[in-house]
Image (cartoon, rainbow, N blue to C red):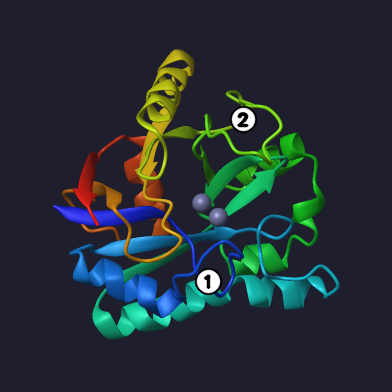
Amino acid sequence: MYLYETHLHTAEVSRCASGSASGQAAYYKRMGFTGIVVTDHFLGGNTIVPDGLTWEQKVNMFCKGYELAAEEGEKLGLDVFFAWEYTYMGIDFLTYGLNKAWLLDHPDIDKLFINDYLDLVRNEGAFVVHAHPFREEAYIPVIQLMPRRVDAVETINAERKDFENRLAAKYAEAYGLKISAGSDNHHGVQESLCAIGTDKKLETIADFISVMRSSAFEIVRMPG
Ligand SMILES: [Zn+2]
Ligand SMILES: [Zn+2]
């Protein structure tokens, strides 16, 4: 089985992360993964990228975590894919399938109303996962769900409580949404990891999306 991490941050881009891009790649290689998707917090979220730059400068800075992880992955034999985690008032949307060129062509998408953002990226072919929908934190005002505007729900997040994951699974089931699972890794070595396992190797992010859309994977939990 091929193991993939769907939800991971780098210290170069995500303000809340301490795991460097190269360190994250090395850790997952050591843990026997075939690939990782780098999902740093997007512009307007918990990112180190400041606001007072041009769009191009911001996108270049934002993509750094992925690019450094990909460089290290190339050396180590770990496949590294690009995505991001878009935040709107405490709701987090993992957005897969669009690349840096697409971002450069779509300035200021960090400033969109959330409905418009989700409609835009999904029309452009993105696969959107609502990450940890039942997470409670001091800075999250209310639990909010947007079942008509996402493709899938992260029903197992290795960093969330079991009951939050159970509610997420009920939510996905009730609305007929696809499921996803990930570690939300911010710091490298973490107590428990959650991978998706596939029986064929994923060559591109499009392969990843087709596996997610067809639920052709197993959820694999393991100690980190
Ligand atoms: Zn974070
Ligand atoms: Zn995250």
In this rendered view, identify the residue nearer to me: 26 or 138: 138
Under mark 1, the amino acid is Ala
Mark 2 belongs to which amino acid? Arg
In the depicted structure, whether residue 75 falls above or below residue 128: below
Q: Residue drawn at (21%, 44%), measured in percent from left and top?
A: 220
Give me the C-alpha separation between circle 1 and circle 2: 30 Å
Image region (quadrant) for ligand 1:
bottom right
Residue under circle 2? 149
On the rendered structure, is 175 left or right of 112?
left
Front in this rendered view, residue 135 or 131 = 135
Instruction: Give the quadrant of the C terminus.
Output: bottom left
- Which residue ends up furthest to the left in the rendered image? 1
Q: Quadrant of residue 188?
A: bottom left
Confirm or reject: label 2 Cβ below 8 Å from ligand 2: no
Position of residue 6 in the picture relative to residue 58 (left or right): left
Q: At which x and y percent is residue 5? A: 34, 55
Q: Give the label, 1 or 2, closer to the camera.
A: 1
